[in-house]
Image (spheres, grey):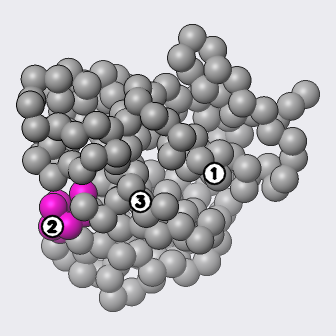
């Protein structure tokens, strides 16, 4: 599973570092050329809930970024979701998944935008109800403090959400280190939490 992370802020960098600990391949898309060059040359030092020095592969080429990922993980401000959806639309490939971290209606906005287009291939669109990571990126982008990882992540998805479930489960399963997990589907929402 390859993951494209769209965005270059706190959540995006925390996700990229954390995915590395899971052995998952990711590529960060950022508009900032100097930030992409920096992350391609120097590792980001993570501390807190996830520690280590992580080489974060990055690009400023949106087409390359979209074509790279099986999952497109959108980690931008909610106000930017519609812009992101419009910009990635021409490059989407069949059976990709788009997951908005802290959706704030991002999935609905994407669905509405895509439904007006004839060139959108079959894909899955999902969103989480909150940010899974509590993190702070240094101003120069060289360090991130991951203050915490949420214990429960709720999300909803339209389409074949198996790939998205695997990613969310990997994040939560790693957090609880092998405790028995349950999956609850309530009104189209899938909730991961500890079996009590």
Q: Earlier in the sequence, mark 3 or mark 2?
A: 3
Q: Residue at x 30, y 54 (%)?
A: 6
Cβ–Cβ below 8 Å for labels 2 and 1?
Answer: no
Q: Earlier in the sequence, mark 3 or mark 1?
A: 3
Q: Residue at x 17, y 60 (%)?
A: 62
Task: Report, in whole angstroms, how far the alpha carbon at label 3 lies from the one at label 2.
Answer: 15 Å
User: Dot 2 lies on which element?
Assistant: loop
Specify whether residue 23 is in view.
yes
Cβ–Cβ below 8 Å for labels 3 and 1?
Answer: no
Residue at image mark 2: 61
Q: Earlier in the sequence, mark 2 or mark 1?
A: 2
Q: Which residue extends farthest bottom?
A: 41
Q: Position of residue 158 (x, y in %)?
A: 41, 26
Cβ–Cβ below 8 Å for labels 3 and 2?
Answer: no
Looking at the magenta stretch, what is its main secondary structure? helix
Residue at image mark 1: 171
Residue at image mark 3: 3
User: Dot 3 lies on which element?
Assistant: strand
């Amino acid at each position: 599973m390859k993951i494209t992370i769209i965005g270059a802020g706190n959540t995006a960098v925390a996700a990229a570092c954390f995915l590395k600990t899971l052995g998952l391949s990711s590529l960060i898309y950022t508009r900032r050329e100097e930030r992409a060059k920096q992350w391609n040359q120097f590792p980001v030092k993570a501390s807190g809930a996830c520690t280590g020095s992580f080489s974060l592969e990055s690009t400023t080429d949106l087409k390359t970024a979209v074509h790279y990922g099986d999952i497109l993980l959108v980690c931008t401000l909610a106000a930017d979701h519609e812009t992101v959806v419009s910009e990635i639309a021409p490059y989407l490939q069949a059976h990709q998944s788009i997951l908005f971290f802290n959706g704030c209606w991002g999935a609905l906005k994407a669905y509405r935008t895509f439904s007006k287009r004839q060139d959108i291939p079959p894909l899955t669109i999902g969103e989480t109800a909150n940010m899974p990571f509590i993190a702070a990126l240094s101003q120069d982008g060289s360090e991130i403090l991951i203050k915490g990882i949420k214990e429960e992540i709720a999300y909803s998805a339209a389409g074949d959400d198996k790939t998205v479930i695997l990613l969310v489960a990997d994040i939560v399963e790693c957090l609880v280190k092998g405790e028995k997990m349950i999956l609850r589907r309530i009104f189209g929402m899938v909730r991961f939490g500890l079996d009590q």
